[in-house]
Image (cartoon, helix red, strand yellow):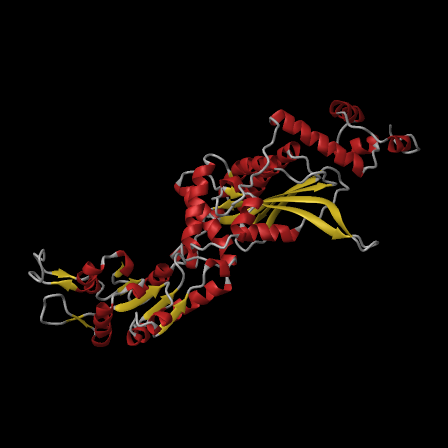
Amino acid sequence: MRYSNSDQEIKLSQRCSRLAKFLDLILEEIPSSSVAALLVDEKNHIVFKEMRRISPAADEDIDRETIKKALAEKHLLIIENFNENPLSGEQQKSSKSVLCLPLVIDNKAAGVIYLEREFAIVPFSLANLEFLIAISKPIKLILKERHEFREISGKGAEASNPLLAGQSRPFRRILTLIDRVKDSDAPVFIWGESGTGKELVARAIHQTGVRRKGKFVAVNCGAIPEQLLESELFGYTKGAFTGAVRDKPGLIEEADGGTFFLDEVGDLPPYLQAKLLRLLEEKEIRRIGENRSRPVNVRFISATNKNIEEEVKQGNFREDLYYRLKIIAIEFPPLRERKDDIFFLLNHFLEKYSREMGRERVYLSPRALEFLMNYSWPGNVRELQNEIRRCLILAAEDELITEEHLSLRINPQRESSPASPYNFLEARAEFERRFLNQALARWNYNRGKTAEEIGLSRQGLFKLIKKHGIDIPKKKETNLLEPGGSG
């Protein structure tokens, strides 16, 4: 269905009108000096902005760098700003606290909900985050109706191979190298720590290259007992040994016309190293118990987490085979050396497993995200993937993963977010009390001015001051009787 420009503008206006109503509810439940909703298109250009402020005099500026960061990382942010006093030159705490929640739809940031508190007594709380995440659900339903979001399709490496995903410079170099070697028949040697995704690199080379119509056959040398490995790789003929009741082609033959991936090649026994070298040189294979050779057309990709050069020095690996396998070498750096990819992968796995579990997209609290970013990830991508699955299970129906959901190795001190001692009504009363203190301080405890600016009658403000037992400093109270003051 196609929309004219005018139709699209009307529909967008209607949806944005509904969206604006949610801002009033957010401002009512989370005392703030201002709250804003911004929607962006596929190029992150702002297509809609709606803002609510407690007074016309409130600062209209929003922290665009925070918004850009939230859109890019697709994680909620809480920022406490520190500004330099231009008069004293001293560092003093700014009275602005920022909470920014990206609206993530199908793993794409469609916009943000942005809140600011002026003269903040305390930062935004976990209860604030949970409320904001809860109210983001109907907001995202409104956004999903937008025509451009229904037509978004994944592009690039994430779409072709979701687990082989990233945005760091080292990762981009790997993608460039994959593109250069994918159509060659030259053997590829991949080195990387366990869990980095070496097999995914091999699969990407196969799936994007000229051999993609052939089979991709993968074998882990360390996972098959040594006495069975030869027959699995090279096959056998009937009667070659006890139990060989029929001819059986080996896995290398099965990959004929495609790609054969030999993982953990450093564990290959010496006598099989010699057979593999002969196969690479002659491009022929001989099954166990057979007198004739068979031609095979296979591209070999091998991988290991061992230091093969050291293995060669120690006589554990044939030097001639090493150089035969290493015509094209790819080194896949560990996750700790490509921190930018952690954000990318966290978002991918949160989206993937939330969808598989049939639940709304779950967010990470800022503190939990800090723990995950600072962890060294010795198990690399595989460990990160498993950690996110574990957190989602432990979080149950919660919409926010906090530090208490993290594994002991990531959060060794078992730090946790302080539990709120309040029920809903008590929490709301606490927000009211803090908000009134902030507003009164902003307008120098002039109750008439404060009531006017925050949209209350003087009687309404007086009732709230009495209800919450807020003390007005006597020195300030005297000033209220001066001309222009409203006691």
Look at the picture and state if 480 lies above or below 463. Answer: below
Q: Residue placed farthest to the front in the image?
A: 314
* Foreground residue among 119 and 309: 309
Q: Quadrant of residue 43?
A: bottom right
Q: x, y (%) of residue 19? A: 58, 38
Q: Residue 7, percent across and down?
A: 53, 45
Q: From the viewer's perspective, tell me whether residue 120 is left or right of residue 412.
A: right
Where in the figure is residue 345, as x and y percent of width and height?
46, 53
Q: What residue do we see at 72% from left, 38% from top? A: 121
Q: Nearer the viewer, residue 242 or 293?
A: 242
Residue 1 visible, this orientation:
no
Name the foreground residue: 109 vs 42: 109
Expressed as whole percent of the image width and height from the top left, the position of residue 224 reads: 24, 57
- Residue 292 occupies quadrant: bottom left
> Furthest-right residue in view?
483
Quadrant where the image shows the C terminus: top right
* Residue 82 shows up from this direction: yes
On the image, which quarter does residue 206 sit in?
bottom left
| Left or right of 248 on screen, residue 42 | right
Q: How many callouts does the rendering have?
A: 0
